[in-house]
């Protein structure tokens, strides 16, 4: 079992719809959870982070964390063609908060169609 | 402007050759990291350094070497022992606030290919 799993997609949604991206992790002691957006050939950029159970909203983005189910998701409201990218879920494994080590999922490719 | 500079953007390696990827940051960050990304894959940690003159292996260190002689610089050498070096290499740095949500700053990456 991979430590951080994402559906590679592509996930295709129409412009204006809600895109839902999901991520599961295997280590129950994982501490912090990050969503990065990566355009093709570019470096990842941080979209959201979350470390407490529940929802965290920032503009059109909402991160949801359920530690009991070991599940973290990213919702993108009013999806735009410019949101088309690969979204990487990253997790801080137990004991790594000081080192900054992250374990990444393989990413989900999102396509927003006009 | 503060940031991380990786060079070169593209690099080609011949059989049996060692090549070095440059990573320089002017963010005054203590911690620096090297990740490898294969097509359709996430990032995998090669090496990381939390302080000058000290570094630790990540999950896929075999065939790679690093040095950290200066705070600003963390070069990665891909040795001839790395049999499948073709990948996108990303350097990152992180501040030292102690917060668990301290984010990584990434460079623009180096695409390494084998001739």
Image (cartoon, coloured by chain):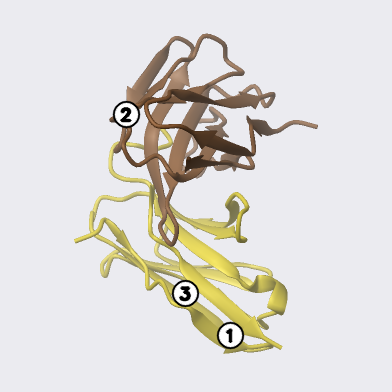
Chain colours: A yellow, B brown
Q: In this orientation, which residue lies closer to the viewer: A95 or A14?
A: A14
Q: Is residue A3 above or below residue A71?
A: above
User: Which chain's residue wears label 1?
Assistant: A
- SS for dot 1: loop
Disc 1 to disc 2, C-alpha distance = 43 Å
Q: In this figure, which residue is indicated by the disc labeled 1?
A: A18
Quick check: B97 left or right of B46? right
- SS for dot 3: strand
User: Quick check: marks 1 and 2 in contact, CB under 8 Å?
Assistant: no
Q: Position of residue B72 (x, y in %)?
A: 61, 18
User: Which chain's residue wears label 2?
Assistant: B
Q: Quadrant of the C terminus of chain A?
A: bottom right
Near mark 2 (Cα within 10 A), the count class, few <14, some 14-19 or many ≥20, is some
Q: Residue at x 45, y 15 (%)?
A: B67
User: Quick check: marks 1 and 3 in contact, CB under 8 Å?
Assistant: no
Q: Is residue A102 above or below residue A65?
A: above
Quick check: B110 left or right of B83? right
Q: Residue at x 47, y 74 (%)?
A: A21
Q: Is residue A110 above or below residue B16?
A: below
Q: Position of residue A10 (x, y in %)?
A: 48, 78
Q: Are marks 1 and 2 on the same chain?
A: no
Residue B63 circle label? 2
Q: In this figure, which residue is indicated by the disc labeled 3?
A: A21
Disc 2 to disc 3, C-alpha distance = 34 Å
Q: Quadrant of the N terminus of chain A?
A: bottom left
Q: Position of residue B36 (x, y in %)?
A: 43, 43
Question: In the rendered image, which quarter is residue B106 located in?
Answer: top right
């Amino acid at each position: 079992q991979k430590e951080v799993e994402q559906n590679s997609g592509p996930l295709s949604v129409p412009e204006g719809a809600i895109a839902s991206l999901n991520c599961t992790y295997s280590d129950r002691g994982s501490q912090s959870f990050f969503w990065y957006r990566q355009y093709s050939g570019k470096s990842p950029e941080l979209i959201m982070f979350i470390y407490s159970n529940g929802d965290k909203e920032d503009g059109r983005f909402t991160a949801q964390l359920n530690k009991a189910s070991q599940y973290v998701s990213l919702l993108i409201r009013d999806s735009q063609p410019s949101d088309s990218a690969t979204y990487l879920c990253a997790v801080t494994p137990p004991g790594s908060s000081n080192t900054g080590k992250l374990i990444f999922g393989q990413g989900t490719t999102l396509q927003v169609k006009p | 402007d503060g940031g991380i500079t990786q060079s070169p953007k593209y690099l080609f390696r011949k059989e049996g050759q060692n090549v070095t990827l440059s990573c320089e940051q002017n963010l005054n960050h203590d911690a620096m990291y090297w990740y490898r990304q294969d097509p359709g894959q996430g990032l995998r940690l090669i090496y990381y350094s939390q302080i000058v003159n000290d570094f630790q292996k990540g999950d896929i260190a075999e065939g790679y070497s690093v040095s950290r002689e200066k705070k600003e610089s963390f070069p990665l050498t891909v040795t001839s022992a790395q049999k499948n070096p073709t990948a996108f290499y990303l350097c990152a740095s992180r501040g030292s606030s102690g917060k668990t949500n301290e984010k990584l700053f990434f460079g623009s990456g180096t695409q390494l290919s084998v001739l």
